[in-house]
Image (spheres, helix red, strand yellow):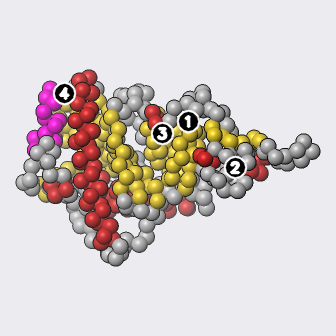
């Protein structure tokens, strides 16, 4: 596999930020896929997004003010409503009637559910509205509940390497060495995979005692896990322990060619787990830092643009990711239905 055909997947939903980071009347400036984006939450609670560049003289709109209804540029006071429509140019005198819509700022579609804000990043050369069948990820059974726990880490790499790292089963014994997670002995894993919407799913299976000690420590039943992946970079891991559930949503968002944000959110039904949040933050940060550290090392080699040799079966999920990504980009370019290239099969590896 060549390492020089990197591209951002467009016309799809990306994780933007947790809902509780933006209160009514607030605005937040972010970069997504190399584009400056201004997110605002109006006084009525609705989140909107627009390009964070004033069309007059290029000052970031985030340098101005947001009064809960409109954004005002700090340079000459041009005003924009939450969907980027220009509403006022203060320097105009009464006789100078001009069509303000000529100065509208690009807006972005936003969805908010279960404590998460998602943004639709269109392809500027081939913008297409969100496909109804590719909605934002929603975790069944949690209604409008927000995640009880969120950790966000920036990885110094192109998005593909962060996504592949998420679905890489062979790195754990070498990267995540901790008594509470894995032991050091390799053993064979056999897992059934099926195609699922815009991705694939590792079928529900019993979690081995040496493959997730924290879940076994919880008690109350045998832990069983199902892990699904879908484009553009969303991994959902659902673990059931008796009548309880712990669901991990991990979402990958490209910031630039060299930086990617990984959001790790947890939902659970065990009421007492909240007491351990401080400890969970330490464990999650340790776990994600281990991934980030190895990705930093990977960047040293990737500078020389090596051919990457993915193998069967342990790299099959990585290969599926690249196939899914290419097929999605082609289906959008050709304005045709997406055809999932993943074929259900059993994968075996040692980890
Ligand atoms: Fe924004 Fe002039 S640069 S109003």
Q: Can residue 152 be seen in this view?
A: yes
Task: Locate residue 288 relative to residue 325 in the image: left or right.
Answer: left
Mark 3 or mark 1: name the one nearer the start of the chain. Answer: 1
Task: From the image, state whether disc 4 or disc 2 is nearer to you.
Answer: 2
* Disc 3 to disc 1, C-alpha distance: 14 Å
Task: From the image, state whether disc 3 or disc 4 is nearer to you.
Answer: 3
The secondary structure type at the circle numbered 2 is loop
Quarter of the image that includes the C terminus: bottom left
Q: Do the residues labelled 2 and 3 touch (CB within 8 Å)?
A: no
Disc number placed over residue 242 in the picture, else none: 4
* Disc 4 to disc 2, C-alpha distance: 59 Å
Q: Are marks 3 and 4 in contact (CB under 8 Å)?
A: no
Task: From the image, state whether disc 2 or disc 1 is nearer to you.
Answer: 2
**Dot 2 corresponds to which residue?**
75
| Majority secondary structure of magenta residues | helix
Confirm whether the magenta stretch covers residue 1. no
């Amino acid at each position: 596999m060549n390492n020089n055909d990197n591209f951002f997947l467009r016309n799809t939903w990306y994780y933007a930020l947790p809902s509780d980071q933006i209160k009514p009347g607030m605005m937040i400036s972010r970069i997504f896929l190399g584009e400056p984006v201004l997110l605002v939450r109006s006084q009525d609670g609705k989140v909107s997004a627009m390009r964070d560049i004033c069309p007059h003289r290029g000052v970031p709109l985030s340098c101005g003010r947001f009064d809960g209804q409109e954004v005002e540029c700090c340079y000459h006071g041009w005003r924009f409503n939450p969907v980027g429509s220009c509403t006022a140019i203060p320097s105009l005198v009464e006789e100078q009637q001009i069509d303000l819509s000529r100065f509208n700022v690009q807006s972005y579609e936003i969805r908010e559910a279960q404590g998460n804000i998602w943004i639709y990043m269109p392809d500027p050369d081939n913008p297409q509205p969100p496909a109804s069948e590719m909605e934002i990820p929603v975790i069944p059974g949690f209604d409008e509940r927000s995640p009880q726990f969120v950790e966000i880490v920036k990885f110094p790499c192109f998005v593909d390497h962060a996504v592949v790292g998420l679905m890489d089963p062979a790195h754990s014994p070498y990267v995540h060495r901790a008594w509470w997670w894995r032991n050091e002995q390799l053993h064979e894993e056999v897992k059934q995979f099926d195609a699922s919407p815009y991705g694939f799913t590792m079928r529900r299976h019993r979690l081995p005692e040496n493959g997730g000690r924290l879940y076994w420590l919880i008690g109350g039943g045998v832990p069983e896990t199902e892990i699904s992946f879908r484009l553009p970079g969303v991994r959902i891991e659902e673990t059931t322990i008796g009548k309880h559930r712990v669901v991990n949503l991990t979402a990958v968002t490209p910031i630039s060619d060299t930086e990617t944000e990984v959001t790790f959110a947890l939902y659970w039904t065990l009421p007492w787990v909240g007491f351990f949040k401080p400890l969970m933050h330490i464990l999650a940060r340790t776990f994600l830092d281990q991934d980030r550290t190895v990705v930093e090392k990977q960047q040293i080699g990737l500078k020389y643009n090596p051919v990457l040799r993915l193998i069967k079966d342990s790299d099959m999920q990585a290969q599926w990711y690249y196939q899914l990504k290419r097929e999605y980009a082609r289906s959008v370019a050709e304005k045709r239905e997406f055809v999932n290239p993943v074929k259900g099969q059993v994968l075996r590896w040692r980890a």
